[in-house]
Image (cartoon, helix red, strand yellow):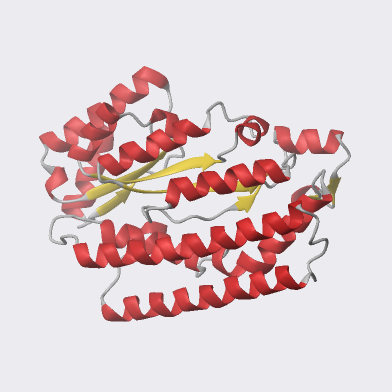
């Protein structure tokens, strides 16, 4: 613990670093002992006065987020948390071998908001055993989780990484095509395949890539919420960013819900169905509007968004 804070102090006082990422997929993993260690690190940071000079960020599981624990880390300069939420439907979470329920994620988000910490999260709308109902449940969870603009809604689908239980199960089911490193699968219900193809048509530009609005908005939220020594938070800019995020989240989820309705009713049976095409065109048009607003915001003020992705 002391050696860790020694390194933090060296970075801050010898190399003038002001933002530190603890590169650990689960900073709080390991039960009671790990949480005591984390509190010890925070106490030592405060003892040395380092919280007056820098801020730091971590990643952890949502079921590890407790008010008393996180409050001690915030007092030591914690400013941002990444959570691997992954899903908001109980069946999907079970398929992914996640031993949590959706309400755990919601409680974690509420705690982070109460402590005034920015956060973002990973999310998979679809996994290999998804149904239209699990997709709808995930969509509704995303709406609840992000409707205030505190975090950016985005999603992908589960990839069958080599050597994982999911890859093994899909191979046993005879559902993987292609080489091990580039294996693909189709869903059990062709309508879910259509839904995913629609998502790519409508949201690929928004949700995927370094310069996609989903990624840029994440960075902007982090930047506008950041309140650190020598760089106070601009409340008006923070509020404007959340308004932009709410708008982007709302458009994506409204379009996704409309597409789900069309596909579930079997009114739409292919990507060429006119209403699906119009929905995708609307989503892409709104995405371009968000991009223009992001460009205007970036030009109006110096932005530290890139710190989130280093």
Total residue callouts: 0
Q: Position of residue 68 (x, y in %)?
A: 25, 27
In the figure, is residue 249 to the left or right of 93? Answer: left
Residue at 18 percent across and 55 percent down: it is 228
Residue at 86 percent across and 33 percent down: it is 172
Q: Position of residue 30 (x, y in %)?
A: 42, 23
In the figure, is residue 23 to the left or right of 161? Answer: left
Identify which residue, 127 or 244, lies in the foreground: 244
**Which quarter of the figure is the N terminus placed in?**
top left
- Which quarter of the picture shows residue 33? top left
Using the image, determine if residue 96 lies above or below residue 135. above
Residue at 27 percent across and 53 percent down: it is 19
Q: Position of residue 84 (x, y in %)?
A: 50, 41
In the figure, is residue 44 to the left or right of 60? Answer: left
Identify which residue, 277 or 288, lies in the foreground: 277
Using the image, determine if residue 43 lies above or below residue 286. above
Identify which residue, 109 or 181, lies in the foreground: 109
For the question of whether residue 61 can be seen, the reply is no
- Which quarter of the picture shows residue 5? top left
Q: Position of residue 132 (x, y in %)?
A: 71, 46
For the question of whether residue 293 can be seen, the reply is yes
**Which quarter of the figure is the C terminus placed in?**
bottom left
In the figure, is residue 20 to the left or right of 263? Answer: left
Most distant residue in the right direction: 174
Identify which residue, 260 or 209, lies in the foreground: 260
């Amino acid at each position: 613990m002391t050696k860790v804070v020694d390194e933090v102090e060296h970075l801050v006082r010898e190399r003038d670093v002001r933002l530190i990422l603890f590169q650990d997929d689960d900073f709080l993993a390991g039960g009671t002992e790990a949480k005591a260690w984390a509190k010890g690190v925070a106490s030592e940071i405060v003892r040395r006065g380092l919280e007056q000079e820098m801020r730091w960020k971590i990643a952890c599981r949502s079921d590890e987020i407790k008010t008393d624990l996180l409050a001690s880390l915030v007092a030591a300069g914690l400013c941002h948390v990444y959570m691997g939420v992954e899903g908001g439907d109980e069946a999907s979470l079970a398929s992914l071998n996640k031993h949590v329920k959706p309400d755990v994620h919601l409680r974690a988000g509420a705690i982070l908001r109460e402590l005034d910490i920015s956060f973002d999260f990973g999310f998979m709308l679809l996994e290999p055993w998804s149904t239209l109902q699990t997709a709808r449940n995930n969509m509704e969870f995303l709406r609840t989780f992000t409707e205030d603009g505190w975090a950016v809604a985005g999603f992908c689908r589960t990839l069958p990484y080599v050597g994982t239980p999911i890859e093994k199960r899909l191979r046993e089911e005879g559902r993987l095509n292609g080489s091990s490193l580039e294996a693909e699968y189709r869903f059990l219900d062709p309508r879910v395949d259509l839904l995913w193809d629609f998502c790519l048509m409508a949201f690929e530009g928004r949700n995927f890539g370094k310069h996609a609005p989903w990624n840029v908005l994440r960075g902007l939220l982090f930047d506008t919420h950041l309140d650190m020594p020598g760089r106070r938070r601009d409340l008006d800019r923070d509020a404007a960013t959340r308004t932009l995020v709410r708008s982007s989240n709302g458009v994506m989820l409204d379009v996704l819900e409309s597409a789900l309705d069309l596909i579930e009713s079997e009114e739409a049976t292919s990507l060429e169905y006119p209403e699906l095409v119009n929905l995708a065109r609307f989503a892409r048009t709104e995405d371009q509007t968000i991009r223009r607003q992001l460009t205007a915001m970036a030009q109006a003020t110096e932005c530290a968004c890139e710190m989130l992705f280093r």
